[in-house]
Amino acid sequence: MLQLQKLTKRYPTGDLALNAVDLEIPKGQVLALIGPSGAGKSTLIRSINRLVEPTSGSAILDGVNLTELSSGALRRARRRMGMIFQEYALVERLSVMENVLSGQLGYVGFWRSFLRKFPQPAIDEAFRLLERVGLDQMADKRADELSGGQRQRVGIARALIQDPQLLLVDEPTASLDPKTSRQIMRLICELCAERGLSAIINIHDVALAKMFVPRVIGLKLGEIVFDGGPDDLTPEVLTDIYGEEDWEATIAKIDDDDDSDPV
Amino acid sequence: MSTAVTSPGRKWKRPPSISNPALRWALIIGALIYLVAAFATIDVNWSRVYEGLERGKKFILAFSNPNFVERWDDIYDGMLESIIMAFSSTVVGVIISIPIGLGAARNIAPLPVYLVCRSIIALSRALHEIIVAILLVAIFGFGPLAGFLTLAFATIGFLSKLLAEDIEDSDKSQAEAIKATGSSWLQWINYGIQPQVMPRLIGLSIYRLDINFRESAILGLVGAGGIGATLNTAFDRYEFDTAAAIIIIIIAIVMTLEYSSGLIRARLQ
């Protein structure tokens, strides 16, 4: 469904962040992208929806080459790619509902969005999603009144109301405590399964990645150095990706405590 | 203290910000010499100051006995004109400042637009209100129209610059998230940027209203209308009691504006 062909990004400073990355993601697959800081994980997902403009290569979503789109066509294509951010990236002075509805901006005209008169089906869907992530009572709270886990749930609802085919997820748990991290990862993976979405999840936490995803990509200096299942991530592979470290000690099994209660 | 100190008694001093001692002392001594020399050039005519003290005293004493009544009609007309000038120039100035401020923010505007908008701001800031007022009085004649145009022009330089800087300081990730939804440029500004800068925009607009009101008292001196004209006339006639009344009203209005802007900003945060 998504194919990256020789996708390359060189920043004006001369840093080669992505070096001819080839990757194919079938419909409905959730994959984790791991790698050290500076490996190009963020650049990779931002090059797909062109928040970062790739230097060369192509990213093809359902037969459409995203890298060649004009700005209008790019906006329409972005509607099909929901994005979830590390620091949640909610607009802090807007309400929870406005943040969720902002996911509909690609579908409504300027005046409707300016006057906050969204179509009723969009509002229904927003409430449904807020209920699904357990925040339907919070619709009129301001985004900066919420806790970290709650904010990330709003971020997830905002991405899903776009009705995307693909989720681009950038370090969804890096600002969260370990328990909330697992709840958020579980929620993302469940929602992808419910809706048949593909997802690319950038993640630092290798143990967490192994717990939830069927496929892991290792990125190092802008190149893919590993592509396999979570069980293939041996200490040797991790050393190859990250450098020398005692991997048995750092990714020791953590007890999965009862974390079904909402955050 | 359980850990051993590697070298006990080792001295520490904050490193000086200019590390070359010769340069450091040359700068300090040079600045002192300049200061002394500068003071030496101030030429004070003490007998003139002595005479002037009497007039100053009269002026100060007039504050204990301000005369609101004698020229009340002139004061009322001048005040009303100043308030209208200040308010209308602020509204017009703010409306024009918003697009220029957006254009002058490097993170959202393309380079040519940025340069044009920055030039407009630079022009507006380079010319002092008085100079603009003299020019506009020459074009439009005496009266509040010249004052209104002057203040609106000055507001553009002030507000666009500060708005642009606030936009440049805004959180990139919030704007990025809105862009990623497939929003249009206007929606992106409305959802991703505007909520971040709105409290500051409103605070600055009220502050500018306050400045414009005070400036309108000065612009009268060059014939651009407002309370300044009334104040100038009062001084010319040595009617210090009327002048005192005018100044007291100006202070009261500025303080009211200051207090209400504080209230509004506290509510907006």
Image (cartoon, rainbow, N blue to C red):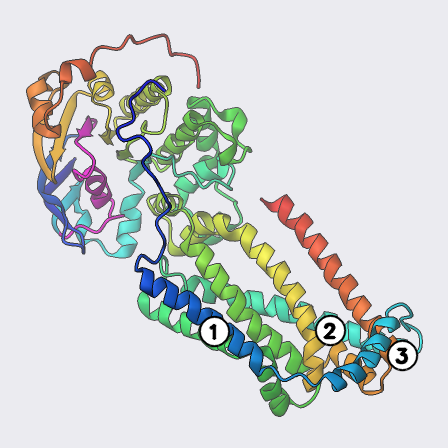
SS assignment at label 3: loop
Left or right, residue A68 beside residue B201: left
> Could you tell me which chain the residue with mark 1 belongs to?
B
Label of residue B82 in the image: 2
Q: Is residue B250 visible?
A: yes
| Amino acid type indicated by mark 3 | Arg
Left or right, residue B66 beside residue B83: right
Label of residue B33 in the image: 1
Query: Could you classify mark 1 by the number of other residues whose Cα lies within 10 Å: few (under 14), some (14-19), or many (20 or more)?
Result: few
Q: Quadrant of residue B142?
A: bottom right
Residue B136 in the image, given as x and y percentages of width and height = 60, 86
Query: Could you classify mark 2 by the number of other residues whose Cα lies within 10 Å: few (under 14), some (14-19), or many (20 or more)?
Result: many
> Could you tell me which chain the residue with mark 3 belongs to?
B
Residue placed under numbered mark 3 in the picture: B71
Q: Which residue is at 13% across, 39% downward?
A: A3
Nearer the N terminus, badge 1 or badge 2?
1
Front-most of residues A33 and A39: A39
Count of numbered labels shown in the rendering: 3
Residue B47 in the image, given as x and y percentages of width and height = 76, 86
